[in-house]
Amino acid sequence: MVRKLILGLLALAVSAGAADIPAGKVPAGNQQLVRQVTSLPPVDERLKQSHPEDAPWLQDLFEGLTVVDHQGNIQPGVAVSWSSNDNRHWIFTLRKNARWSDGSRVTSSDFVNSWQQLAAPGTPERYQNYLLQSGVYNAPEVLSGELPGQVLGITAIDDWHLKITLSRPLAYFPVMTAHPAFFPDKPPAGTPEAPVSRQPRQFNGAWQLNSQQPHSVSLVPNPHYHHAEQTILSKVTYIEISNTQELLQRYSRGAVQISAPLKTPPQLTAKLADQLHRSPRLSAQVLVFDRVNGPTSDVRVRKALSWSIDRQAITTDTLQNKAIAGWRMTPSAAGNFTPPLLSAEQHPPQGRISQAKSLLLAAGYGPSRPLNLTFSYRDSGDEPEVAHAIAAMWQKQLNAQVTLKPQSSGQPRFSGADVTTATVHAEFNHPAAFLNQLTTGHPQNISGFSNAAYDSLILRAERESSEPLRNQDYQQAEHLIAEQVPVAPIFQYVTQRLVAPEVQGYSQDNPLGYSNSRELWIEQQTE
């Protein structure tokens, strides 16, 4: 059966994420927005940017085959529809009114050129890893240099149809195409009078580059964007501010209207605290156990350690609500996923402690033989505080003897430790982005977990076109993680930003952590 995803005539006529002015709201006369970033590399060098959350201008300047709306869901971008018979061979149909900022048409060849660039020397490893994760045919061989980029599994059938071949079926592949790694690119055409080095970069998003200074960049609407009439802002300026106090001073006087993510928000006045927006992120903190050596090679010990952690106390008291307590590998904010209720969550806190003590006794640990652990953690960010809090819980609840071992970022995670902290994050909004990290041989599987039943569930989910059935596979995978405990999820991070009250259209529901400027507008403020 042909599987076809077409999001309807309304979706084709109205661009996802367009700014919308509700009845009763009045736009201000000045529709210029200033957003803070903590670093500002050359914004037109797409493949040299950091994580999309830290480089929000990428979504302003470029548009992929699909786009992410303000709730984190996939909508049509340059592609108006996509289809596959087997979830391995995909055909994307491009909209014919997609234009670059010079007015020329965006064609399927622009995507072919861009994706082949991912394999070029100098491309950041994170983008090349994303290409590998996507399963594009011949990607490993092209990246290793065994094959030329021209044999990558992407082909322009004609100007409006793009064929993508994967090495294995991936039912969720369209979700991955919204990532900046897969944005199109139009190589500048140089002439003797105007060499390539002098040609301006072209953009196919709702915005185009106006000017770039050492510490700021300004964007203006792209008049050739396929829904340009729905952009309300007249200008967006990104300004580089790395000092928190300087940010607060500028924000307080209205010189900045949206902050970059605040990793450690300072003490805010009551007025500013009301303007702090928190939204769940696709990033989580987990504990990783040594399953081969020492006491944590016993699954009963791993489960006891996990069950005895008061996650709510960690997020509320230790982290001051900068995170959300969690028991699952997949954060609750992930799209296309209904979280299962795990066994540990069905017990009250004291019931979990009682179960943990029983598990330790069954594993041979008790008053006459206390559990001895070495616990390593990164000596930066919030990890020291979190590690000390968890160690105190184990000492109090389980009478465990815990040796804390701080490590710098350059040291191996384990290096003799029984348990260590780790952060897992996703580049796209789907449970597979997290659960795949525990499959056998996955490059991000730092636990070394290898379980045939788990691998089978993930493989079946990748091939399954039915979202409810795929969700069942992911739920079973979460239950299996909870039983085998290769890792113990602790909490899910949140994004925290200051957003001025006059800024409308900002959403807290996008777990990828960014808000497209085309969705935003400035409301007239009354004195």
Image (cartoon, rainbow, N blue to C red):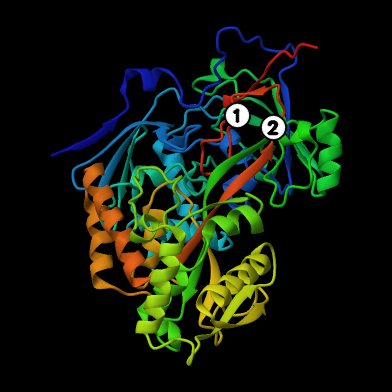
The residue that appears at 53% across and 24% down in the rendered structure is 225
The residue that appears at 50% across and 53% down in the rendered structure is 117
Vertical position of residue 25 compared to residue 51: above or below: above
The residue that appears at 45% across and 86% down in the rendered structure is 366
User: What element does badge 1 sit on?
Assistant: loop
Quarter occupied by residue 350: bottom left
Vertical position of residue 42 compared to residue 457: above or below: above
Quarter occupied by residue 345: bottom left
Distance from Cα at disc 1 to Cα at disc 2: 8 Å
Q: Which mark is residue 241?
A: none
Quarter of the image where the N terminus is located: top left
Q: Which mark is residue 506?
A: 1
Mark 2 closeness class: few <14, some 14–19, many ≥20 residues within 10 Å: many
The residue that appears at 49% across and 22% down in the rendered structure is 226
**Front-most of residues 84 and 204:** 84
Mark 1 closeness class: few <14, some 14–19, many ≥20 residues within 10 Å: many
Vertical position of residue 70 compared to residue 353: above or below: above
Of the residues shown, which amino acid type is indicated by label 2? Val
Give the image location of residue 435, x and y in percent: 37, 59
Of the residues shown, which amino acid type is indicated by label 1? Tyr
**Front-most of residues 62 and 480:** 480
Give the image location of residue 55, x and y in percent: 64, 45
Are dots 1 and 2 in contact, CB under 8 Å?
yes
Mark 2 highlights which residue? Answer: 499
* Residue 2 visible (yes or no): yes
**Front-most of residues 506 and 487:** 487
Between discs 1 and 2, the one toward the N terminus: 2
Q: Which residue lies most toward the bottom here?
A: 368
